[in-house]
Amino acid sequence: MKNIVVLVSGGGTNLQALIDAQDSGIIQGGRITCVIASKPGVFALERAAKAGIPSRVIPRKEYPDSLSYSKAILEALNEEKADLVVLAGFMIILDECVTKAYAYKIINVHPALIPSFCGEGFYGLKVHEAALEYGVKVSGATIHFVNEKADAGAIILQGTVNVEMDDTPEILQRRIMENVEWKLLPKAVSLFCQDKIDIVDGKAYVRE
């Protein structure tokens, strides 16, 4: 049984999707053993407590730079014996000391179809604002491994939704979360925990 550690910064809707998937048996071969928040008082911590999942708070503002903060996160992941790290609305880019130590063991969800609307500066509603401004007809989300570059790791799963003429960034965000993120993130986690993701030449291939 693999230990899943989830990193959060806010409300924790993706964390809740993982908790629900775990409770319903969708996630096989692993369990959420710890939730780590980048600041105190976020609602994701309440979700973890309600589900009986231990949590820790490592406040970003208490560290002078990205490297020192990343080292604190790395130490916590090692202490928790993490087999898989899931970034679920974690709004901090981690230093390569973490991504190299946990190569192909960190999963992130990005609310667009990578390589579109991704990289530094593309997060939250900014992603959906950019998609609507460009006039795309479909958008979606990408579940990918995390490496040293923002949103550049191997793609595990992608899913799409149609973009409607009267969409706002908020409406599109909600449609993508409900129809793609909350379904594919637990699926990717389960695939990882069952050792059904192969890495070949830097690309991820799923064995269903």
Image (cartoon, rainbow, N blue to C red):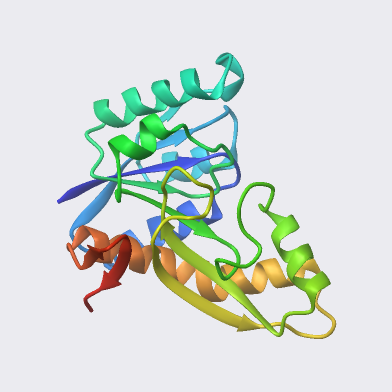
Q: Residue at x 22, y 65 (%)?
A: 198
Say if residue 120 shows up in the picture.
yes
Q: Locate the C terminus by quadrant.
A: bottom left
Left or right, 42 with respect to 85, comes to right
The number of discs equals 0
Q: Quadrant of residue 100?
A: top left
Q: Residue at x 41, y 21 (%)?
A: 72
Q: Residue at x 66, y 63 (%)?
A: 117
Left or right, 170 with respect to 178, comes to right
Left or right, 71 with respect to 206, comes to right
Residue 68 rendering spot, x and y as whole percentages: 47, 18
Q: Residue furthest left?
A: 1
Residue 180 rendering spot, x and y as whole percentages: 52, 73
User: Does 13 sit above or below residue 131?
Assistant: above
User: Does 155 sit above or below residue 161?
Assistant: above
**In-front residue for pair 97/202:** 202
Q: Residue at x 21, y 63 (%)?
A: 28
User: Does 93 sit above or below residue 166?
Assistant: above
Say if residue 23 shows up in the picture.
no
User: Does 19 sit above or below residue 87?
Assistant: below
Residue 85 rendering spot, x and y as whole percentages: 35, 45
Q: Quadrant of residue 127?
A: bottom right
Residue 90 rendering spot, x and y as whole percentages: 53, 43
**In-front residue for pair 94/164:** 94
Left or right, 162 with respect to 59, comes to right
